[in-house]
Image (cartoon, rainbow, N blue to C red):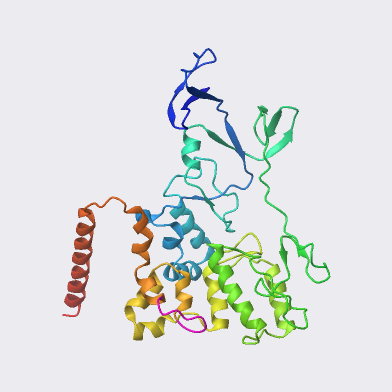
Amino acid sequence: MYIIWERDNGWVDGWMKTDSHHKSPKPGLRYYEIFLYEVMISTERGSWVMSRVFDNGYPWDMVFLSRFLNIIRNSLPGCITVWMIANRVSQWFNHANYGLIPKDRRLMREPVLNDLLPSCIITGKISIMPAVKEFKENAVVFVNVPTAEEVDTVVFATGYKASFPFIDESILKVENRHASLYKYIFLPQLEKPTLAIIGFIRPFGAIMPVVEIQARWVTRVFNGLCKLPPPKPMMEEVNEKKKNKVNRFGLSFDEVLKTDCLVYCDELGSFIGIKPSVPALLLKDPILAMKIFFGPCSPYQYRLTGPGKWDGARNTILNQWERVLKPTRTRVVEDSLNCFSCLLKGLAVFVILVGIYLSFN
């Protein structure tokens, strides 16, 4: 049992470990008794766990979701792509040693973004258990565990069931966690595209940029500025998507609603006319082209051209790395290691150029 002493003004005075025979608190102080319990997480399929803080302290999606890396992932055979992702996320900690490694690694599930889970497991605060076999009056029996574990509280983290009760099922019905929607938005059978579902998608990445580009496309369809295909090809694409086949190349997801956010946003962006062209930018603005191709795929890229163009998009893309770290640089320090790394990079480029020159002579 832990006791936290607190002053009358709300400031914590200190804390100490004690037993049930603790002394009375000092006059003018309040105390709280906190009983620590072990937490058990039951999972049948497991999951990759990722930290929000990635290379050099940047957010994970800024490092992981770039056009360059996305092309590599989607160009390689699925087994190699899965191995690359498994190797990358396991650099933080070995998922097998923590009982978290996914059961079926052919299909990509959304990773768990949690910075505290590994430390809680290694300190004994959380135990990862297999699937639940049965419940007893005051205990739980897990699969392949000989003894029952006594528990006080059970929390079912089973998610939620998606539905649209305000729309008749003859128009829109959710089956197997998805609906028959063209590009996850439009109903193919409607005579006119007057109904759109925004956000009924689970992208591998942030949801808000995806929802934004969905809304931009929908408003243009409603205004007659963008046209949808005939109902038949839309329905054929929806039915093909329902099969959720395992791709030979790139990532394959375990649910129909899950998709590659970068590929999806580029597809909708091409419909609107806002998808950035890296080859064209390479001739016109090579610095910006390199930032777009190798840097994070931020929503500003879809503001460079076409409807909704923003004049400040280019400058925002060029300095987005600095702006991300600006709130964390509250203490100004001299980074000598950064200068040394730049020197090494310059030396490496020089050696490569010398090697290329000597190879032709």
The quadrant where residue 39 appears: top right
Residue at (64% x, 32% y) in the render: 145
Q: Using residue 189 as the reference point, say whether residue 205 is left or right of it.
A: left
Please name the predominant secondary structure of the magenta segment in the image.
Answer: loop
Residue at (19% x, 72% y) in the render: 355
| Image x and y of residue 214, in percent | 60, 73
Residue 66 in view? yes
| Image x and y of residue 137, in percent | 75, 28
Looking at the picture, tell me which residue is in the foreground, 13 or 131.
Answer: 13
Q: Using residue 290 as the reference point, say whether residue 301 is left or right of it.
A: right
Residue at (34% x, 68% y) in the render: 319
Residue 248 in view? no
**In this picture, is 96 found above or below 125?**
below
Q: Using residue 292 as the reference point, say whether residue 245 is left or right of it.
A: right
Tell me, yes or no, whether the highlighted magenta stretch contains residue 42.
no
**In this picture, is 270 found above or below 95?**
below
The quadrant where residue 281 appears: bottom left
Q: Point out the stretch of residues depicted in magenta.
A: 305-312
**In this picture, is 286 found above or below 181?**
below
The quadrant where residue 136 appears: top right
| Image x and y of residue 334, in percent | 21, 53
**In this picture, is 358 found above or below 163?**
below
Tell me, yes or no, whether the highlighted magenta stretch contains residue 306.
yes
